[in-house]
Amino acid sequence: MIFLVLSILSSAGIYVIFKYLDRFKINTFNVIIINYITAAALGLLLTKTNPDIFPLLKNAWLPYSIIIGVLFIMMFVVIAKSSQIVGIAITTVSNKMSVIIPIAFSIIIDPLDVLTNFKAVGIILAILAVFLSVYRKRKVEFDPRNIYLPVILFLGMGLVDSFVKYAQHKYVADDILPIFTVILFAMAAISGLVTKLLRKTPFRELIDKKILLWGIALGISNYGSLYFLIKALNFKNNLGNTMDGSIVFGINNLGVIALSVIIGLVVFKEKFLKINWVGIIISFFAIYILSRT
């Protein structure tokens, strides 16, 4: 459970950093690139074996780390575009509700992840809690033809977490985890640099002191978010059993939302609707139920 708590704390740290980036009007995309470079460097520091390139090419998990890394940047672009065109409210709901996909995927691929009645209640409460917690009462006006953006975001974010679950389930044990993250975040960084090149924006922006500092801070949080999530999926109790992936993803998502709401209230003085508080209360019930299955 400690790894799950650390993943939740790391993910909440990402939320806090993005809030400050928005407040200080700092170029988010440049920070994202430095963040991925930092995360790849952290993975390299944790790698105990010599990461020779040719033996790496033979590993079955390599395509998954590359795909996830590329999807990271793609989803960032979709989030930015969806926020601008469709609105932040719908974009946030689409992003958070995508947890449905890895929960279902874990139950499908893992024979030990059985959908009991008790767990089903917890998952339903978790989905309801996510929706109510991120709901915002805003007038929604957008061209219906742009509905593809939140749909892509919902499917894309769900696909990312599902790939993470599949790679962990099939290949990524704790000894493989550091080098797996190196390739993943390195591919995300390369994809970001290529995107920056295509946008024809100056690379010297990346060495700005503020960009570097916020990028490193984000990279540490981002790395911890993924690293500890996979550690939580791999962790075995005294009986040699791992926690079901559907439970890990459910608790992780709920924990991040609940902690982010608390931070938003205390640190950023954000205002929340009564329906958001109902969602938070339900989330604690869902976490309790899921943790007991």
Image: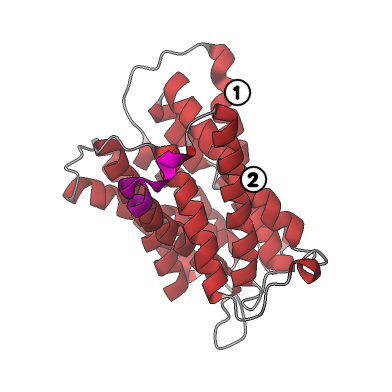
> Residue 97, how many percent across, how many down?
50, 41
Q: Secondary structure at mark 2?
A: helix
Nearer the N terminus, badge 1 or badge 2? Answer: 2
Q: Decide if residue 14 is on the left or right side of residue 98.
A: left
The answer to whether 150 appears left or right of 8 in the picture is right
The amino acid on which the numbered mark 1 sits, given as a three-letter code, is Tyr
Looking at the rendered image, the quarter that the N terminus falls into is bottom left
Q: Residue at x 29, y 48 (%)?
A: 261
Q: Which range is magenta?
A: 204-214
Looking at the rendered structure, which numbered label has been put on residue 148? 1
Q: Nearest to the eye among marks 1 and 2: give it.
A: 2
Q: Nearer the viewer, residue 238 or 160?
A: 160
Q: Residues within 10 Å of mark 1 (few under 14, many from 20)?
A: few
Q: Is residue 254 magenta?
A: no
Q: What's the residue type where badge 2 is placed?
A: Val
> Quick one: 100 or 19, which is closer to the camera?
19
Give the residue drawn at x 52%, y 53%.
123
Q: Counting other residues with Cα less than 10 Å from the Cα at mark 2, is it few (<14), some (14-19), or many (20 or more)?
A: many
What is the number of the mark on residue 70? 2
Q: Determine the main secondary structure of the stretch shown in magenta.
A: helix
- Among all residues in the image, which is located at the extreme bottom? 238
x then y, percent, for residue 222: 46, 57
205 magenta-colored? yes
